Amino acid sequence: MPSRSSGHWSDCSGEFGERGGHPRRDYYQHKRAAGKTHKEAMRCLKRRLSDVVYRTMIKDTETSLLLAG
């Protein structure tokens, strides 16, 4: 099975967000309405998703440290 780059999976997650009635779709459409091209809007969406993942990781780390300490 060929390996996929993380960028590929980010593209997929953005595409799924465009199809449903999710906040990702609204964010994408907002960026498009602001004059961004598809690629620019996808880049913004990927950045937003990576920020959410990062915040979740930090929150989980803080929670585990509180429970351990």
Image (tube, helix red, strand yellow):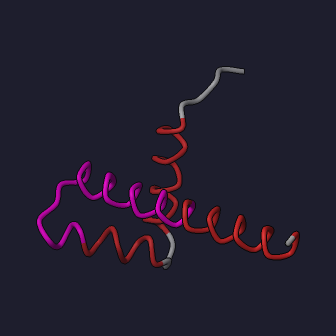
Position of the C terminus, as image quadrant, is bottom right
Q: Which residues are magenta?
A: 31-53
Looking at the image, the residue that sits furthest to the front is 69
Find residue 27 and report its image quarter. Answer: bottom left
Q: Main secondary structure of the magenta part?
A: helix
Q: Residue at x 51, y 72 (%)?
A: 20
Q: Residue at x 86, y 75 (%)?
A: 67
Residue 53 image position (x, y, % from top left): 57, 61
Looking at the image, the residue that sits furthest to the top is 2
Residue 47 image position (x, y, % from top left): 39, 57
Q: Is residue 40 left or right of residue 14?
A: left
Q: Residue at x 72, y 21 (%)?
A: 1
Residue 15 higher or lower than 2, as above or below: below
Find residue 26 and report its image quarter. Answer: bottom left
Residue 35 image position (x, y, % from top left): 11, 65
The total of numbered circles placed on residues is 0
Magenta stretch containing residue 42, yes or no?
A: yes
Q: Is residue 51 left or right of residue 33?
A: right
Magenta stretch containing residue 22, yes or no?
A: no
Residue 3 higher or lower than 31, as above or below: above
Q: Residue at x 64, y 62 (%)?
A: 57
Find residue 24 and report its image quarter. Answer: bottom left
Q: Is residue 14 left or right of residue 53?
A: left
Q: Is residue 17 left or right of residue 29?
A: right
64 vs 27, nearest the viewer: 64
Looking at the image, the residue that sits furthest to the left is 35
45 vs 16, nearest the viewer: 45
